[in-house]
Image (spheres, grey):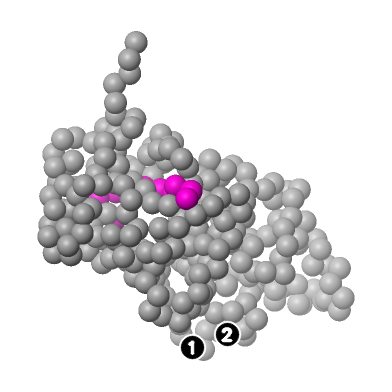
Amino acid sequence: MTINFNIGKYDNNQKVWRYLDFTKFISLMDSEKLFLARADSFTDDPFEGSYPIKNIESRKSIPGITSDLLIELERVNKKFKEYVYINCWHANDYESAAMWNLYLKSNEGLTVQTSLGRLARSIKNDRDYILHIHEIKYIDYSKDGFNDNNVMEAFCHKRKSFEHEREIRLIRTLLQYSEANDILNDPKNIIVQGGLAIDVDLDILVENIFIAPNAPGWFIDLVKAVLIRYDLIYNTSLFSRVRKSDLRFDPIF
């Protein structure tokens, strides 16, 4: 496996966070895998994998381009989303109150905190594929554009209205964009419904686990019980990495 880093302004020590409800946390612990969702499943952002107006207009000046080819290109770009799989992290030196509110529908949740370096090292190198770790850039799709010579750029840009996410993505593709005919017809039948998973070493991945600020006491005990069991089975020390949310502490007046 090859990891392609494109983390822009960040370095390997940058803290990144993944906010999880209890079900997803159990899935992570039980499977020791990170789940990558298919790009076309991100229904909260219909612009996912799309191109800004500036890029669309520039296609019309490609030598020899015809209206039929432009339509075909649009079909390929839409279909390509089914071959792209993404796992999202939040880059921040601190917990984010906004992210707690956005990604947890109840108080029974937590966030796994790691660093970009630990995230990369935790991925088990036992398969032959390329995994991209990318910083997301936020632009105005009505005015700005990006270099679309690399199809990955369509999945590494989002609208400015999502800038609060400060997103880092793990991205894997199942086909090369140059295989346009395969993208449209899928003769290899390789599309994975829903998403796919990559194996990770949790002892490396998990630096800290922060419990949701308003989590009830029984939930904290439940998380600790799960981690004690995991540590006994796999000889790890995840239990010692559980933390109260920094947002939970009482203020001083």
Bounds of the magenta span? 13-24
> Residue at label 1?
188
Which amino acid, mark 1?
Lys
Q: Few, some or many C-alpha atoms within 10 Å of disc 2 (few <14, some 14-19, many ≥20)?
A: some
Helix, strand or loop under label 1: loop
Percent x, y for residue 234?
Answer: 18, 65
| Residue at image location 19% in from the left, 49% down from the top | 239
178 up-or-down from 135: above or below: below
Do the residues under discs 2 and 1 have CB atoms within 8 angstroms? yes
> Residue at label 2?
182
Q: Earlier in the sequence, mark 2 or mark 1?
A: 2
Percent x, y for residue 130?
Answer: 51, 75
Which amino acid, mark 2?
Asp
Q: Is residue 220 left or right of residue 162?
A: left
| Residue at image location 81% in from the left, 63% down from the top | 58
Q: Is residue 90 visible?
A: no
| Residue at image location 83% in from the left, 76% down from the top | 65
- Asked if the stretch drawn in magenta spans residue 16, the answer is yes
- Asked if the stretch drawn in magenta spans residue 5, the answer is no
Percent x, y for residue 184?
Answer: 59, 80
Q: Few, some or many C-alpha atoms within 10 Å of disc 1 (few <14, some 14-19, many ≥20)?
A: few
Percent x, y for residue 6?
Answer: 59, 60
Residue at far top of view: 253
Q: CA distance from mark 2 to mark 1?
A: 8 Å
Q: Is residue 173 left or right of residue 160?
A: left
